[in-house]
Image (spheres, helix red, strand yellow):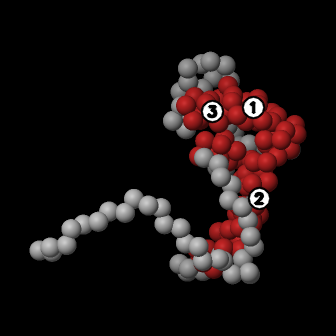
Amino acid sequence: MSTRQPRFNQQVLVDTTPLPDSIPKVREIGASSAPLLSAAYFIGARCKAYNDDYMVCKTQANGTGEIDCLKEGRKVTRCAASVLEDVNKHCLEEFRKHWECLENNNQQLWHCRRFERPLNKCVFDNLRLEKVIPGTPSNVTPVHLRERQIYSQNLT
């Protein structure tokens, strides 16, 4: 057995090594999970091309994508930040109500449909971004457009 006492470090480690100049600089988004979830479909709508480029790069990198695809990842981050900035500029009240509802309801979207509808309308009217759930069959009404939710408190 070892005679050395265990030591636990509770400090946050930060790597201060600067990235190479070939990697574009970008500020991190700095949003928690609720605002990101609230804006996720709009980010997906506007940033699809950047996301696809990043995923192709990661697939082709054979396990080294975290390093090899930093440039593409920075483009995704910049695009997502622009969506959040635009949503905050044009639909702040609706956006805040929706993400606060998500924050208070364990990130469950079905609890927050009554705040989601005005947000979707505002974002479409101002930014022309529409919420589309991938994989929804064409003959089925998407869950966020249904008048009555299966799982809900029916507070319209």
Q: How many marks?
A: 3
Q: Considering only vertical position in the picture, is 15 above or below 142?
A: below
> Which badge, 1 or 2, is on the more N-terminal residue?
2
Give the label on residue 79, or none. 2
Q: Which residue is mark 3?
A: 100
Q: Earlier in the sequence, mark 3 or mark 1?
A: 1
Q: CA distance from mark 1 to mark 2?
A: 21 Å
C-alpha span from label 3 to label 1: 10 Å
**Which of the image's four quarters has the C terminus?**
top right
Q: Position of residue 102 (x, y in %)?
A: 59, 35
Q: Which sits earlier in the primary sequence, circle 3 or circle 2?
A: 2
Is residue 119 placed above or below 39 in the rendered structure? above
Quarter of the figure with the N terminus: bottom left
Q: Which residue is mark 1?
A: 94
Dot 3 alpha-carbon crowd within 10 angstroms: few under 14, some 14 to 19, many 20 or more: some
Report helix, strand or loop for mark 1. helix
Three-letter code, disc 2: Cys
**Element assignment for label 2:** helix
Residue at 71% from the left image edge and 74% from the top image edge: 71
119 up-or-down from 30: above or below? above
Q: Residue at x 60, y 19 (%)?
A: 154
Farthest residue to the top: give it: 155
Tell me which amino acid carries mark 3: Glu
Does the CB distance between marks 3 and 2 fall below 8 Å?
Answer: no
Type of amino acid at the residue the image marks with label 1: Glu
- Mark 1 crowd level (few <14, some 14–19, many ≥20, 10 Å Cα): many
Which residue is rendered at x = 75% and y = 73% of the image?
Answer: 24
Element type at marker 3?
helix
Which numbered marker is on residue 149?
none
Whether residue 156 sits left or right of residue 151 in the image: it is right
